[in-house]
């Protein structure tokens, strides 16, 4: 058995004890990243498949780097150049790779529910690296680690999640994770970018940004997902930026020490100005480093002591 649950699909179903153990372990794993030789081969002999059927820079590369630091073998699978392009199904692809001895799949897929499907299809362990609009648990874990690193604890914090909540698996995972660790969660978006089921989430809902930012400890700014904008969610990028963009003007209404997070990739000048993204309140680059530590922790906790 690993040291946490077999699969990591979303934070709604992940026990609070797993969330705390992953973040605590990530703080200890982060020390390895400051060493001149970043190699701790505790997962030697383990085989991890990074299965990315949707684009990624941060998640894919940090998981692959984490595998290399911990000594696991990596099978880097992407749709381009694979037999999916010859019509092979997702299920047959999973079964084929599992038959090559994969201990753990890390899956990024455009379809919500694809990681859950994988968990029901193969015996290997599954980490959801982002499935459609459903969940992105490792992103929320690294966001929470970054908040703890700067504030000591999440308990009692007020965290605003701002922007394209409708399309956002990052928002859905953060809402559940932050609640489990005792934060008060606000979301703010135009009505058209709020999910229909928003009242079933444990958060306060705002449509007026100036109201939403009052007294916040942190703002997690979501990317406007232009690739998923298949309807008229707002009339122009200019209008979105005017009412929901974080820039130096709205920042005058925000508490001075408010932390600014963004999962990336950033649309500069749309949801966030460069002055704020690169400014003193921004912890966006820290999020990326913490992402590597969180992914090392997850691999360690899921695979350590595990024999196929
Ligand atoms: N935040 C995030 O998931 O980024 P990537 O799409 O680059 O992995």
Image (tube, rainbow, N blue to C red):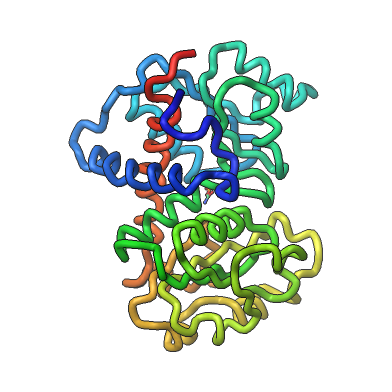
User: Residue drawn at (48%, 79%), measured in percent from left and top?
Assistant: 247
In the displayed structure, 58 sits above or below 225; it is: above
In the displayed structure, 41 sits above or below 298; it is: above
User: Residue drawn at (79%, 59%), measured in percent from left and top?
Assistant: 230
* Residue 270 visible in the snapshot: no
User: Residue drawn at (53%, 58%), measured in percent from left and top?
Assistant: 174
The image quarter containing residue 99 is top right
Question: Residue 3: image x %, image y %?
Answer: 41, 31
Residue 250 lies left or right of residue 236; in this view the side is: left
Of the pair 48 and 180, the residue shown nearer to us = 180
Of the pair 196 and 245, the residue shown nearer to us = 196
User: Residue drawn at (65%, 63%), measured in percent from left and top?
Assistant: 201
Question: Residue 306: image x %, image y %?
Answer: 43, 19
Farthest left residue? 36
In the displayed structure, 307 sits above or below 243; it is: above
Of the pair 299 and 180, the residue shown nearer to us = 180
Residue 102 lies left or right of residue 87; in this view the side is: left
Residue 7 lies left or right of residue 67; in this view the side is: right
* Residue 68 visible in the snapshot: yes
* Image mark count: 0
Of the pair 41 and 216, the residue shown nearer to us = 216
Question: Residue 295: image x %, image y %?
Answer: 42, 39
The image quarter containing residue 168 is bottom right
């Amino acid at each position: 058995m690993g040291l946490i649950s077999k699969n990591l699909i979303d934070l709604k179903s992940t026990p609070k004890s797993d969330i705390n153990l992953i973040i605590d372990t990530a703080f200890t794993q982060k020390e390895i990243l400051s060493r001149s030789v970043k190699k701790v081969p505790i997962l030697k002999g383990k085989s991890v498949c990074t299965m990315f059927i949707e684009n990624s820079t941060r998640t894919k590369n940090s998981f692959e780097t984490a595998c290399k630091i911990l000594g696991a073998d990596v099978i880097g699978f992407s749709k381009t150049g694979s037999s999916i392009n010859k019509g092979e199904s997702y299920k047959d692809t999973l079964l084929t790779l599992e038959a090559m001895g994969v201990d753990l799949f890390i899956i990024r897929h455009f379809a919500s529910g694809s990681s859950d499907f994988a968990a029901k299809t193969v015996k290997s362990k599954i980490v959801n690296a982002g499935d459609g609009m459903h969940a992105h648990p490792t992103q929320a874990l690294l966001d929470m680690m970054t908040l703890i690193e700067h504030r000591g604890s999440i308990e009692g914090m007020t965290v605003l999640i701002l922007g394209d909540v409708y399309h956002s698996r990052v928002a859905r995972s953060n809402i559940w994770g932050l609640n489990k660790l005792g934060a008060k969660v606000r979301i703010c978006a135009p009505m058209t970018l709020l999910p229909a089921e928003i009242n079933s989430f444990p958060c306060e809902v705002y449509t007026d940004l100036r109201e939403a930012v009052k007294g916040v400890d942190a703002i997690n700014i979501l990317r406007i997902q232009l690739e998923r904008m298949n309807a008229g969610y707002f009339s122009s990028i200019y209008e979105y930026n005017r009412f929901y963009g974080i820039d130096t003007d709205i920042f005058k209404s925000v508490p001075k020490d408010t932390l600014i997070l963004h999962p990336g990739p950033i649309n500069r000048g749309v949801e966030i100005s460069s002055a704020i993204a690169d400014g003193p309140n921004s912890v966006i680059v820290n999020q990326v480093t913490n992402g590597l530590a969180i992914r090392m922790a997850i691999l360690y906790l899921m695979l350590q002591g595990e024999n196929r």
